[in-house]
Image (tube, grey):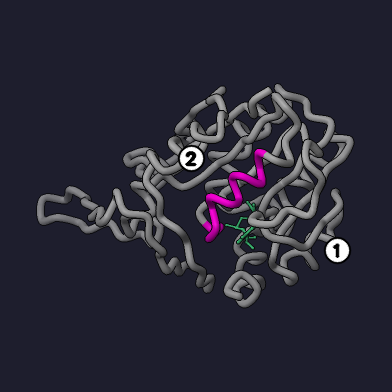
Amino acid sequence: MDWDSSARAWIEAQGTHGDFSRRRVLDVPMLDRVHAFAPRALLDLGCGEGRFCRLLADKVETLVGLDPSKALLCRARELGGAQFVHGRAEALPFERATFDMVVSYLSLLDIEGIEVALDEVKRVLRPGGRFLFANLTGFATASDIKSGGWRVQPDGARKIIVRRYLEPHAVKAEWKGITVTNWHRPLSFYMTHLLERGMTLTHFDEPAVPEPADLKEQAYNNAPYQLIMEWQAPG
Ligand SMILES: C[S@@+](CC[C@H](N)C(=O)[O-])C[C@H]1O[C@@H](n2cnc3c(N)ncnc32)[C@H](O)[C@@H]1O
């Protein structure tokens, strides 16, 4: 399983405070949403080595991280902060209506059986509970932006090529010694599947790097890269 074989490189890439996207872009708005809803029971779906759980450790009464990678879970358990459970989003080992909030922090694009996983998220959420996720945009997963694939034109302009945007497909992603399969899906895929499950959109954001410190940080804000959505379960 590729997340197990990339676990060492992933742990190193995250360091203590997370990689650039997490530290500079996503952590603040993701934590704001959790704090605003103040869940008593929260599931971090695809928790990896558990960093987001550690950020929430003394804020949520019942905090559970779930991941299929034994190597990442081993690291999460070493560092603590939550109950860490082995499992997959497609078959959650929890009773229905167990959680007030389910969070997926950049893990939806890693989940192969996404339709079943969305059924499972709805099942384990209590009525009115929230599904909060950060994901790469379809623009990013249908292009090579993630591996720094900008093409510099003779006039200095930087261009990126987007392919097969409307067609869900697997993408091999490689960076910093990490090699995994991601699943590209257009925005309409997620919107349609969540609406079909009777979920209601309560928040949407495409967060930017706040006050970019240099041209590299500024460049991050030039193209759609990451989004945050929060959906309310019916009932
Ligand atoms: C990009 S990492 C994100 C980890 C963590 N959420 C974070 O932000 O540091 C994606 C995670 O999704 C997990 N994953 C892959 N397939 C999964 C599945 N079917 N169900 C749940 N998690 C899965 C991987 O093992 C990995 O830990």
Residue 72 image position (x, y, % from top left): 72, 66
Relative to 72, does residue 53 appear above or below in the rendering?
above
Indicate the quadrant where residue 198 lies.
Answer: top right
Q: Characterize the local packing of mark 1: few (<14), some (14-19) or many (20 or more) Cα atoms within 10 angstroms.
A: few
Quadrant in the picture for the C terminus: top right
Of tags 1 and 2, the one toward the viewer is 2
Q: Is residue 130 left or right of residue 182?
A: right
Tag 1's secondary structure?
helix
The structure residue drawn at horizontal position 80% and vertical position 49%, both measured from the top left corner, is 94
The structure residue drawn at horizontal position 75% and vertical position 31%, both measured from the top left corner, is 126
The structure residue drawn at horizontal position 64% and vertical position 56%, both measured from the top left corner, is 90
Residue stretch rendered in magenta on the structure: 110-122
Name the one closer to the observer, 21 or 155: 21
Name the one closer to the observer, 190 or 50: 190
Given the current orientation, which residue lies at the most extreme left position?
154
Residue 125 image position (x, y, % from top left): 72, 36
Q: Is residue 121 magenta?
A: yes
Indicate the quadrant where residue 220 lies.
Answer: top left
> Residue 78 has which mark?
1
Relative to 7, does residue 31 appear above or below in the rendering?
above
Relative to 39, does residue 189 appear above or below in the rendering?
below
Counting residues from the N terminus, which is met first, the one under dot 1 or under dot 2? 1
Q: Is residue 111 magenta?
A: yes
Q: Is mark 1 within 8 Å of ligand 1?
A: no
For badge 2, the amino acid type reads: His
Q: Is residue 203 left or right of residue 96?
A: left
Magenta region's main secondary structure?
helix
Q: Is mark 2 within 8 Å of ligand 1?
A: no
Query: Splitting the image into four quadrants, where does ligand 1 fall?
Result: bottom right
The residue beneath circle 2 is: 193
Q: Is residue 95 left or right of residue 36?
A: right
